[in-house]
Image (cartoon, grey):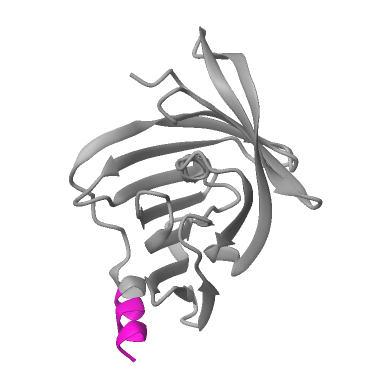
Amino acid sequence: MRLRSALTLLVLAGAPALAQGRVIDEGVFNITKAGGPSATESFKIMRAEGDAIVATGQLTAGTRRITSSLTTDSAGTPAKYDLSVYDNGALVQHVGALAQGGRLSELSKDGHGNESMTEYPLAAGKSLILEDDLVHQTYFVALARRSGSVQVIEPRGAHRATLTLAAIGLEPITIGGRSATATHYSLGNSLGRRDFWVDAAGRVLRVETSQGLKAVREELPR
């Protein structure tokens, strides 16, 4: 009951609070996707108290806006999550999730007040939150320089999958008219794949998926 009460507070709270701490990365992605409107995603990733990392983002695509706040440990294992989806200014979905006792408990509420609760097992250093269209969350995939099997949770779709992460190697890319060398990674399974490129500090520069999504930063990190 105490956990559900905490989840309910997350659902009722609405927009996430801003994190305080040292900025790890901050920027804007320009996103295109086959069959959908172009989008922009602004984000900030910060080192908070202790070893916690907090990532906040806002995606705008046509009439739809998504805000999110994800708190993890130093390896990217989720501790707390908050996401709101708006269409034409109206809230159509809110998701709150908390980790406790090796599990992530999620409470989702739609715009009509209907609620659903889902639980996922968590493996420290191997479990991640990654929504299909929130590209800044890709930062947590390469955070621990892991490889092999990764458990990926998509709370908005109440979905969990085992994906394989592999480092492909160094490649030259162009961001905002400037060239850079980045490490190319792939994450996926037989149903789909996400390729992404990160700089030496682990900051995501570009993301492409087999579903036709392409995201590129407006400019190189400073």
Q: Position of residue 100 (x, y in %)?
A: 37, 75
Q: Determine whether 113 is above or below 179 in the image.
A: below
Left or right of 221 in this view: 126: right
Q: Residue at position x 34%, y 92% from top? A: 1
Q: Determine whether 21 is above or below 216 in the image.
A: below
Instruction: Give the extent of the magenta segment.
Output: 1-9
Depth check, front residue: 9 or 45: 45
Left or right of 77 in this view: 216: right
Q: Position of residue 95 (x, y in %)?
A: 45, 68
Q: Residue at position x 63%, y 39% from top? A: 37
Residue 24 image-quadrant placement: top left
Magenta residues, dominant SS class: helix
Does the stretch in magenta take in 49? no
Task: Specify the quadrant that holds the C terminus.
Answer: top left
Residue 171 image-quadrant placement: top right
Q: Position of residue 63 (x, y in %)?
A: 52, 49
Q: Residue at position x 66%, y 61% from top? A: 161
Depth check, front residue: 179 or 156: 179
Q: Determine whether 151 is above or below 181 in the image.
A: below
Q: Position of residue 10 (x, y in %)?
A: 32, 71
Q: Determine whether 114 is above or below 170 in the image.
A: below
Farthest residue, direction right: 190
